Structures are given as structure tokens and as C-alpha cells.
Image: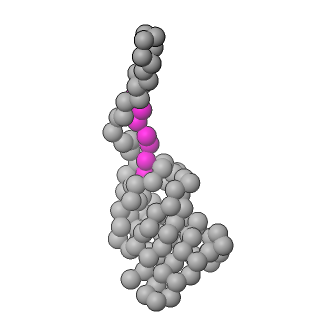
Amino acid sequence: MNLAIIESGSKQYLVKKGDKIQIEKIAGEVGSLIKLEKVLMVADGANVTVGKPFISDASVEAKVLKQARSKKIIVFKYKAKSKYRRKQGHRQNYTELEIIKI
């Protein structure tokens, strides 16, 4: 089984073929193929390759399934005894990918 650790948006993801992951929004049309070049580690059975920090000749191909926004979260700031209240909502943009090839 091929495993890889990729980096996208300052976060790291452990992926294998067929996985569906949500990462921070990247450019790409729905249905298009993209190539993720920042591969930190590749494991193929007993063979493990670790980059310093990235592996130069490795890449992960993925298909863009969806460009969407996540559920709304509420950011509420409050200070006791001072009548200070701030309410703010936030929805994060994300891209959903399906891993095609490692």
C-alpha cells in the first residue's frame, strides 16, 4: 500500500490512493487534475523515503471534487463586568480532493 505525507497550506496530511481530503482552498476547477509537489514522505510497503524537507522527484496527483465553504463558526469575545461583547461569524473556504496517484 502506498502512503504519502503531503503539505498544503502549512498543514500536513497522510494520504493513500482513493482518499478524499479537505484542504485549504487552492486554485483549480471542479473535475480537473492537480499535482501536489510538496511530498514529505513516501512509503511503499517496506521501502520508506523521507525528504529533507521535501522529496524532489515525488508528487501526488489528485482530482478536484468540490470548491466549497465549511460550516459557520461563531467567534464570541466577552469581558466580565465591562459590558464588552463582540460576536463574529466565519466560514472557511476549502477544496475537496480525491487522491488518484502517488
From the top left corner, tell me how far across and down residue 53 is, in percent: 64, 69
| Res 64 quadrant in image | bottom left
What is the total number of numbered labels drawn onto the structure image? 0
From the top left corner, tell me how far across and down residue 52 is, in percent: 66, 73
Left or right of 53 on screen, residue 90? left
State the residue at coordinates (50%, 69%): 5
Left or right of 59 on screen, residue 73? left
Quadrant for the N terminus, please.
bottom left
In the image shown, does 27 or 76 lie closer to the viewer? 76
- As drawn, 10 above or below 90: below
In the image shown, does 38 or 13 lie closer to the viewer? 13
From the top left corner, tell me how far across and down residue 93 is, in percent: 44, 42
- Residue 58 visible: yes
- Residue 86 visible: no
Q: Which residues are magenta?
A: 89-95
- As drawn, 46 above or below 89: below
| Res 50 quadrant in image | bottom right
**Is residue 28 a member of the stretch shown in magenta?**
no
State the residue at coordinates (43%, 51%): 95
State the residue at coordinates (36%, 42%): 70
From the top left corner, tell me how far across and down residue 68 is, in percent: 38, 44
